[in-house]
Amino acid sequence: MKTTAELKQIATQVRRDILRMTTNAKSGHPGGSMGTADWFVAMQWNIMDFDPDKFTMSGEGEDMLFVSQGHITPVIYSTMARRGFFPVEELKTFRKFGTRLQGHPSTAHNLPGIRMASGSLGQGLSVGVGAALGKKMSGDNHIVYTMHGDGELEEGQIWEAAMFAGAKHVDNLIATIDYNNQQIDATVDEVMSLGNLQSKFESFMWKVVVIADGNDMQQVLDGMAKAKTLAGQGSPICVILTTKMGYGVDFMQDTNKYHGAVLSADDLPKALAQLPETLGDF
């Protein structure tokens, strides 16, 4: 367990990693990665129950995480490396042909921490439901977590899985929605408004926790801790996590410009100046 101050320092370093990885590769998705850094850090260090040295594909006897919007690999890989799943130096290989750190998560390279090839949007909740039911059948009391983009909720398969999970009382499942109101072409509201998301999930028999500021580490810790207390009570849990895309660098925030575009070599130093090095760069 880490203190809130320590987690904030880790999140700052993770954001540095994200920008350096994507700029070095000249491709990637920094915006959503930066916005969810606080959540991933909180999950990896304080919320989830697992041992990075004992990773198994089955996930037996530990909490599991499936990231459905797999394009945010920069934050996935950075937090995994900093947590000890693989060497931090390997972040230098991000998006290089044939390496383990592909642009979207791949199970083909046996990368510890990755149990699902994702990025084809809409599928992660179904996988999470299946994993959670598997734990119930085997008597494993651990929790299955999933993470989704708000734009991803425009995929119909999400709602099939949500309906099933509510109807079948899959109460060892906690799904988090990164609600930044940005997707690749425009805002989510402009493309296809989600309406009252809390009411929608509640109508599907889910319990809902709202984290008003998903870039405030203490709010993230408190919200996810509350979600955990709701597990085992007959309903799946949805966490609505309001974040800012590109959080941490003022000129990257609240725009979809950096959803799938990276900083130029000239802009990178300007961005890094806003994110002091805390753990040491790779």
Image: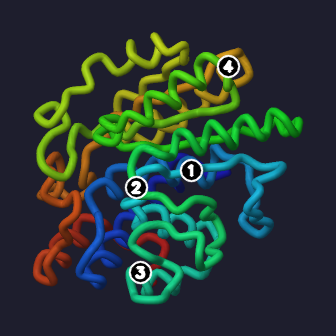
Q: Nearer the viewer, residue 27 or 275?
A: 27
Q: Position of residue 252 (x, y in %)?
A: 16, 57
Q: Earlier in the sequence, mark 4 or mark 3?
A: 3
User: Does the image show residue 13?
Assistant: no
Foreground tag (4 vs 3): 4
Please tell me which residue is depicted at 48% across the width and 62% down the height of the picture.
76
In the rendered structure, find residue 120 and report the number of the disc placed on it: 2
Looking at the picture, does residue 189 appear above or below residue 260?
above
Residue 258 visible to the viewer: yes
- Depth check, mark 2 against mark 3: the one in front is 2
Question: Are discs 4 and 3 less than 8 Å apart at CB?
Answer: no
The mark nearer the N terminus, 1 or 3, is 1
At mark 3, the secondary structure is loop
2 and 1 marks in contact (CB < 8 Å) = no
Residue 122 in the image, given as x and y percentages of width and height: 42, 44
In the visual, does 44 lie left or right of 192?
Answer: right
Q: Disc number at residue 98? A: none
